């Protein structure tokens, strides 16, 4: 299970590898949590069911179904992050339009670069200060390798077959702390009130996970390491970044080692998989 450090991002509470909305609705999605403005928009959410992952088959068939179902959603979310990154690269902070300023503030809040409790946050006056904020934000706004996303989803959700995946579309063990925000763990200790967050689509669980790694302070070393090795891609980058996920689980290094073993054993299948494997 992830740790319990708290950060507030765009109206959503992030707790380690965890997620909750500050409402009582278990169906509240991240696509409704910020103003819908240009580059600040979220991608459309795909209404996908995980129930097909319960179908019988060989281990290879079950893995193929899992990767084929989730891979397109990860690609959509990562592509959106890449689009945001390109927008930031091209931004001329010396002559920001009002819409650009709004988008920039939205992204600064979403990735936890500035404190989201300041609803009326104003960008600093000088171009140098604005550029410093953009440079800092660039360290947060980058895709997570698909191999890492998929194997961590497989690890946390028992290949999409867990109760929390099947009933709540929760792929990464995210928790929430508002009554009715998710599913109550059957073995929750007395006196604790957390629930396992429910999402209306697996894509929103993926989005929350990516937001967590890119925005939460516990994974700052992961983001720094990613920026230091822009030459790495794919499974090679996934193996490298997995080294910085010890804080995602109370298992620490054992968890990291397990993720790396899963990346190595599944990287060829992930690379070759396509939606045709769902047939």
Image (cartoon, grey):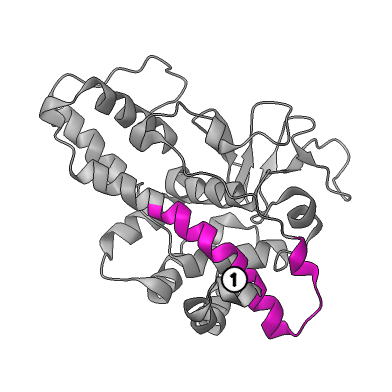
Total marks placed:
1
Q: Main secondary structure of the magenta part?
A: helix
Q: Quadrant of the N terminus?
A: bottom right
Residue 69 in the figure: left or right of residue 164 = left
Q: Secondary structure at mark 1?
A: helix
Q: Nearer the viewer, residue 112 or 276?
A: 276
Residue 80 image offset from top left, x and y in percent: 40, 49
Residue 202 image offset from top left, x and y in percent: 64, 52
Q: Residue at x 73, y 67 (%)?
A: 158
Based on the picture, tell me whether residue 30 belongs to the magenta stretch.
no
Q: Residue at x 48, y 51 (%)?
A: 213
Q: Nearer the viewer, residue 104 or 245?
A: 104
Residue 157 image offset from top left, x and y in percent: 70, 62
Q: Which residue is mark 1?
A: 67
Based on the picture, tell me whether residue 55 belongs to the magenta stretch.
yes
Residue 155 image offset from top left, x and y in percent: 65, 67
> In the rendered image, is residue 252 in sight?
no
Question: How busy is the neighbourhood of tag 1: few (under 14 within 10 Å), some, or many (20 plus)?
Answer: many
The quadrant where residue 249 appears: bottom right
Q: Quadrant of the C terminus?
A: bottom right
Q: Residue at x 38, y 49 (%)?
A: 81
Q: Which residues are magenta?
A: 51-79
């Amino acid at each position: 299970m992830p740790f319990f450090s708290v950060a507030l991002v765009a109206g959503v509470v992030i707790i380690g590898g965890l997620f909750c909305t500050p409402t009582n609705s278990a169906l509240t999605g991240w696509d409704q949590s910020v103003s819908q403005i240009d580059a600040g928009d979220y991608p459309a959410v795909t209404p996908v069911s995980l129930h097909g992952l319960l179908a019988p088959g060989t281990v290879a068939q079950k893995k193929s179904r899992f990767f084929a179902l989730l891979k397109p959603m990860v690609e959509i979310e990562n592509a959106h992050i890449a689009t945001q990154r390109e927008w930031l690269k091209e931004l001329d902070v010396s002559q920001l339009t009002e819409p650009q300023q709004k988008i920039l503030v939205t992204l600064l809040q979403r990735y936890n670069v500035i404190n989201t409790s300041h609803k009326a946050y104003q960008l600093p006056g000088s171009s140098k200060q604005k550029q410093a904020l953009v440079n800092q934000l660039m360290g947060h706004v980058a895709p997570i390798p698909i191999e890492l996303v998929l194997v961590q989803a497989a690890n946390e959700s028992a290949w999409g077959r867990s109760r929390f995946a099947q009933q709540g579309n929760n792929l990464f063990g995210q928790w929430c702390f508002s009554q009715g925000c998710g599913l109550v763990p059957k073995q929750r200790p007395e006196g604790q009130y957390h629930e396992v967050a429910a999402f209306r689509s697996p894509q929103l669980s993926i989005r929350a996970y990516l937001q967590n790694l890119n925005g939460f302070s516990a994974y700052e070393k992961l983001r720094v390491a990613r920026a230091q090795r822009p030459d790495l891609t794919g499974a090679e980058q996934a193996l490298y970044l997995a080294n910085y996920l010890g804080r995602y689980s109370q298992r620490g290094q054992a968890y990291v080692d397990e993720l790396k073993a899963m990346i190595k054993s599944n990287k060829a299948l992930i690379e070759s998989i396509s939606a045709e494997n769902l047939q």
